[in-house]
Amino acid sequence: MQEQKMEVDVGDPVKATNLLRLIKQLLLEKAYDGVRMLFQSAQESERNTRLLPHIAMDLYHDVCLENISDEVNSQEPELFNCSDELLKLLATYAPLQELMLELMERLEESSSINVFGAYLRALQVVLQRQGRDKPQAVEWSLQSVFTRLRELPLPQYLTEGYDEAQARLIEQNEQVENLLAHYITVGLFRQPLRDEILQDVRTSSQTFRDCGLNRRNIFTCFFIQLLGRPLALLEMSHVKEDLTRTYVQQVTESLTQDVSQCLGDPFYLLNLVEQRARWLRKLDASKGVYEMSCRNVFLIEEKLPLHAVAMYYHSLFVGNQLPANAPRIYAPLFLFETIVYLAEVLLRQQEPPLQYCGLRLVEHLLSTLQNSVPTSSLQLDVHKRFCEALCKIVGYSPQVSLRQLGLHVLRQFILAFDDHGKYLILKNLLGTLQHDGLMGYLGGMYKDLVNKALEESGPLPEVYSGKLFREMLLLCVCVLPHDVKSDLLLHSDRLCHALNILRYFAARDKTDVTGFWQALPEIEKGLLDPLEKALNFSMAHYKAYKERVEKGQSASDDELMQRQLNMLAVNISNSGMAGGDAESKLPDIGRQEKLDVLASSITSLETLQSLYLRASEIIEQSTRLRRIANPSNA
């Protein structure tokens, strides 16, 4: 819709000046209905609106700008409402660009939802007048709206993460309530503009989609931006079993539907996502190649942030907002591979709510896969980046629920691949991770996969026997980084998993289908022999240390105690129970506290020693049985 043609009374600017004085006088006398009658009555309306173009900006500066404020709204609400109506009226007749710049500035500086709403209603009229012309100006106007939303104050815990109990009460927070009120106001602002955009139909001469700077694309990017921060920080408040639709869900669903209508094909952006994440543009300022110089607005981070795109697809899939007329030709594997790019973007964000959404997004896509993901998919580097980001959350996030969900998603992600793909992912992670608990879990996962394969009829897959099995087994069980000098308490989780794996294969695979017994000599050299010596040494050391503490002669060993306590503090921090900085040095402790810590350490060593003895016993028994069954190999 092009800018409206307005009839202007050019013959008598004096009449316009008199009208301005009359409006001011009526406002001074608080005759607000009289002001309304000037532009609503059949006798006065036509004549007075002809004069408005002459005085529109004067009326804005002298009346609207002064009276649209929180102070006036609280003390004289009728004056505020009248000024609000005048502002929306004069937006139809004021100089377009001049008023647009004024409204942009006021929107960014608005101090309350009432002031924001008043200027936003006027901007709505201005943008309808603007039509398809000057899309850059339209973009700047929408950015001023988004800037105000982004700068609204929010509770600190939104960026730090919150639990399910807090999530259920999140909309009762005053600042969150204010944010949602702004989003709802923006929803009323965008509806008529969206309806106009949807009337623009691609002509028959346009074979390909126009991805340049036009009104439709600008509004599409704006709607997607609104789905990102700060709204995305509230997404953890969505609890699946709840039957009620929260305001957050309603706002998100409305925005998602608008984006889908503007795009036509909701999956259209997925090809561009891969283009942005996989084939990055080579920017070169000396050659005039800047990010903003791209002619495709969907490829520019400033116009379309990837985390916001990820939240759009989170709403489509997890929020069940996929349109009924969405194309069905996209293969689940294609959707999975491209969505992983977006999930990785969310997992690398600092805010736990965004990480949570990334996990839920991948979890949903994994549930839609009907066949195993082929190993060839691992040629995409995004799988490696995704696993790194996911393992960082699983190992070190202070949010317990996030770590639990992350571990579940990691397991489902690995199991989604074919046998060779599972093997490659596990081997890569075991060779690169530094988190003992997670590495022990992955080693146990490989053991479970081998067990499942052993229970099935037919030959074992290549990755569960022979050379490949041996390589993986050594990664799983040879876990003493410094041989005899390794800190057994620091690596106790992984050592326990390693010993359990040895116990299992020694008891399960007596016929050496996997090749376990061929690898046993290396395992004895790399784990069992040094572990026996390390256990004896550590047990003797801690018992002697305990005796010195009891006698008050432990000063020379207190550095070891401090290291153990700092390690304990890190573990507490990772469990989400720490209240401060876990890396700061803990204060000195007394004699009884030292004895308690030492007793706990000795108990852990005794548990590890019992597992070692049990594993050695089972290996010895199975070796004896193998000799009896096959004397020629004795």
Image (cartoon, helix red, strand yellow):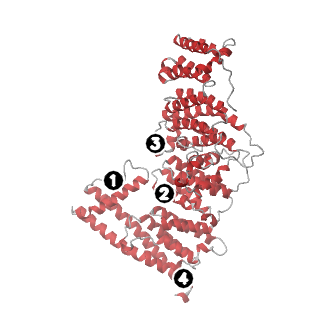
Residue with the mark numbered 2: 392
Q: Is residue 509 visible?
A: no
**Residue 48 or 355: which is nearer the viewer?**
48
Task: Rate crowding at label 2 as few (under 14), some (14 to 19) or many (20 or more) other CA atoms within 10 Å.
Answer: some
Point out the tag, 4 or 2, that comes first from the N-terminus.
2
Rendered position, 247 above or below 310: above
Label 4 element class? helix
Label 3 element class? helix
Spot the residue most to the bottom. Answer: 632
Q: Residue 584 got which mark? A: 1
Place residue 56 in its image quadrant: top right
- The amino acid type, in three-letter code, at marker 2 is Lys
Whether tag 3 and tag 4 are in contact, CB under 8 A, the answer is no
**Residue 123 or 69: which is nearer the viewer?**
123
Number of residue marks: 4
Point out the tag, 3 or 4, that comes first from the N-terminus.
3
**Residue 32 or 497: which is nearer the viewer?**
32
Q: Residue at x 65, y 31 (%)?
A: 128
Relative to 216, 476 lies left or right: left
Residue 189's spot in the image, x, y percent? Answer: 61, 31
Point out the tag, 4 or 1, that comes first from the N-terminus.
1
Label 2 element class? helix
Residue 103's spot in the image, x, y percent? Answer: 55, 30
CA separation in Å, label 1 and label 2: 21 Å
Residue with the mark numbered 4: 626
CA separation in Å, label 4 and label 1: 54 Å
**Mark in the foreground, 4 or 2:** 2
Residue 363's spot in the image, x, y percent? Answer: 60, 53
**Residue 126 or 55: which is nearer the viewer?**
55
Q: Residue 157 got which mark? A: 3
Q: Residue at x 59, y 54 (%)?
A: 276
Task: Rate crowding at label 1 as few (under 14), some (14 to 19) or many (20 or more) other CA atoms within 10 Å.
Answer: few
